[in-house]
Structures are given as C-alpha cells and as structure tokens.
Image: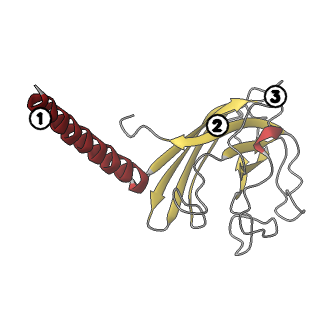
Amino acid sequence: MIKYTAIIFTAMMFFASCTEVEHEQTEMEYQTQTIDQAVAVMHATDGNSVEGTVLFTQTEQGVRVEANISGLDADSMHGFHIHEYGDCRASDGTSAGGHFNPEEAEHGGPDDDMRHVGDLGNLQSDADGNATAEFVDPQLQLSGMTSILGRGVIIHAGEDDLVSQPTGDAGGRLSCGVIGVANMDI
C-alpha cells in the first residue's frame, strides 16, 4: 500500500509541475505579446453628446490614429489629446488627469519636435458635427515605457491653440474614452 501511495504521489507531483511549466510559458507569452491595435470608445461627458471611436494601429513609422466622432458643433475645431489616466469616472472627464507627458515636455502641436506625447492637435468637424481624422504619429507607441495603452482620450470643447501652457487652452471635456486592446476580429 505504501508503494502505491508513493507512485501516486510521484505521478501527481509530475503532473503538477507540468501544469506549472505550461502556466509559466503562457504567462511569458502574454507578457511578450505585441499589441498591434488598440481602441478608445468615446463616451459623452455630462451634458454633451460627443461620441465615436478612435482606433490606434502600430506601424513601423509610429501609431496610425483613426478618429470617427459625432455630436460636435458644426464647423468647429476641438482639442484632441491622450491623457495620463484611462479613467472616465468623473462626469466631466477630469478623472483622466492631464495630458500624457512622460518626458515632461512643454505643450505643443502634433508636428512639434518637443511636445507632450499626448498632444494630437485638433479635430475639425463638418457641417453635420462629424469629425474624422487619420494620421500617423511617430511619438505614440502601443508598448514600452511610453505606451498609450490604458490611457484616456479626451475631446475638448474648444480649439487647442497649440501654444498655451500647459494645455493649449482647449476648454472643457466633451468626451472621454479609455485606450484598450482592440479585438482584431472586428
């Protein structure tokens, strides 16, 4: 009986160690997985109707940003930024914090060499209050120390003047979204 118990115990330990090795391999694969696409689903802040999506796709040149937004004032410009927190709990969007600025740079425009990583410039709405934008931003990344994953996207009430410190004087927050890993099957 003791002999069979030892054999059963040895077999159980073997299978347990195999399962642990498989779990560690799966965990390592997950940690080294590259993220090729992320999305922010934009939700209106209290009293506003601005919504849509912002898709982020990693390219060799940086991250391609594709925004499709509705509910803006007709023919207007709106500051468009990545903010430090992916937190849209506050009804006015302020829980998303300030612009994502890991290098502690001055605020600027998307074409400036020195700027907040999160400074994406402005969205221009059409006569129906819709805005689309598509561009590649070389400062954005979906992995690494300056990853935008888990950060917030904010669309502001006014135009970003691309100069005023520290925010571009773009006004209140009309819409907030959290940047998450995109479902590549959609």
Say few, some or many: other residues with alpha carbon within 10 Å of mark 3 (under 14 / 14 to 19 / 20 or more).
Answer: some
Q: Is residue 54 above or below residue 82?
A: above
Q: Amino acid at mark 3?
A: Ser
> The residue under label 2 is which amino acid type?
Ile
**The disc label shown at residue 69, or none:** 2
Q: Nearer the viewer, residue 158 or 140?
A: 140
Secondary structure of the residue carrying tag 3 is: loop
145 versus 16 height, above or below: below
Residue 34 lies left or right of residue 124; in this view the side is: left
Q: Residue at x 74, y 74 (%)?
A: 114
> Nearer the N terminus, badge 2 or badge 1?
1
Amino acid on which the number 1 mark rests in the picture: Ile
Earlier in the chain: of badge 3 and badge 2, it is 2
Q: Residue furthest front?
A: 2
Could you classify mark 1 by the number of other residues whose Cα lies within 10 Å: few (under 14), some (14-19), or many (20 or more)? Answer: few
* Quadrant assignment, res 126: top right
> Which of the two labelled residues, at mark 3 and mark 1, occupies the earlier sequence position?
1
Which residue sits at x=30%, y=43%?
A: 20
Q: Which residue is mark 3?
A: 91
Percent position of residue 150, x then y: 61, 45
Q: How many marks?
A: 3
Farthest bottom residue? 113
Quadrant including the C terminus: top left
Q: CA distance from mark 3 to mark 2?
A: 19 Å
Q: CA distance from mark 3 to mark 1?
A: 62 Å
Classify residue 9 by image quadrant.
top left
How far is disc 2 from disc 1 in space, using C-alphas?
65 Å
